Amino acid sequence: MDAWIWIVLVIVLLVVVFLMTARKAAIGKVNPTQLSLEPDLIEAVKALAQSNQQIAAIKMLRDGVPGLGLAHATNMVQRMAVQGKQPPTAKPDLN
């Protein structure tokens, strides 16, 4: 009977440790849909992104928003780079 008590205690301890580590990992994450970024940061990141310096833009964005994941930062920078570039307009043929 004593062995069963120890087995149950070990299982409970493992579950508690797992839940604590999972919670700690979730605390550091940032939801990119609920960010309010400073305008200066946005402009600086957008300028880097539009001048083909996306790695520097991603680094600046992640430094400015602690906890922002690499995938989300990359996606945001890519969207900023595309926003500023206007597609070339076709010139009308005046013949």
Image (spheres, helix red, strand yellow):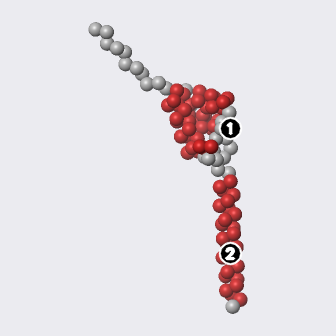
Snapshot quadrant of residue 73: top right
Question: Which residue is at a point 54% across and 32% down the rendered structure image?
Answer: 80
Residue corresponding to mark 2: 12
Question: Which residue is at a point 51% across and 29% down the rendered structure image?
Answer: 83
Question: Which residue is at a point 69% across and 67% down the rendered structure image?
Answer: 17
Q: Which residue of the protein is positioned furthest toward the left in this rendering?
A: 95
Residue corresponding to mark 1: 64
Q: Nearer the viewer, residue 55 or 42?
A: 42
Q: Secondary structure at mark 1?
A: helix
Location of residue 64 with respect to 43 vertically, above or below? below
Quadrant including the C terminus: top left
Residue 10 location (% of width, % of height): 69, 77
Three-letter code, disc 1: Gly
Q: Nearer the viewer, residue 53 or 1?
A: 1
Question: Which residue is at a point 69% across and 91% down the rendered structure image?
Answer: 1
Q: Secondary structure at mark 2?
A: helix
Residue 2 location (% of width, % of height): 71, 89
